[in-house]
Image: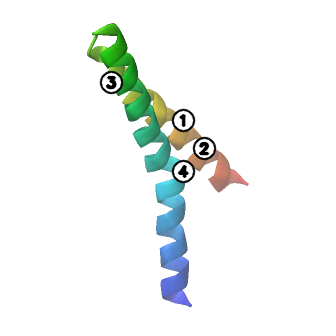
Amino acid sequence: MGSERATQSQTSSWRFFYLPMIIGLAVGAGLASATDQWWWVAVGAVGGAAIGGAARLWRSTR
């Protein structure tokens, strides 16, 4: 039972923080290659991490 709860916590952390960050990184990389401006990658990664952090915070308060 304890290991199941730990695995569930790790999955939740992955879903609500890292996944939006990776999606933001991919979108930023696409914009960077389309516009030839490297900083879109950083904007996408930080924006995705912010969305993921907000989603994780919102979920923890429910």
Q: Which amino acid type corresponds to the residue marked 2 in the rendered image?
A: Ala
Name which residue lies at 49% across and 58% down.
13
- Percent of width and height locating residue 51: 54, 35
Give the alpha-carbon distance from disc 1 to disc 2, as whole Å. Answer: 6 Å
Q: Which amino acid type corresponds to the residue marked 4 in the rendered image?
A: Phe
Give the alpha-carbon distance from disc 3 to disc 2, as whole Å. Answer: 21 Å
- Disc 4 marks which residue? 16
Name which residue lies at 28% across and 10% down.
37
Q: Are marks 1 and 4 in contact (CB under 8 Å)?
A: no
Give the alpha-carbon distance from disc 3 to disc 4, as whole Å. Answer: 20 Å
When the figure is inspected, residue 10 is found, relative to residue 16, above or below; the finding is below
- Disc 3 marks which residue? 41
Of label 3 and label 4, which has the lower sequence position?
4
Callout 2: SS: helix
Of label 2 and label 4, which has the lower sequence position?
4
Give the alpha-carbon distance from disc 3 to disc 1, as whole Å. Answer: 15 Å
Label 1, residues with CA under 10 Å away: few <14, some 14-19, many ≥20: some
Of label 3 and label 2, which has the lower sequence position?
3
Marker count (numbered): 4
Give the alpha-carbon distance from disc 1 to disc 4, as whole Å. Answer: 9 Å
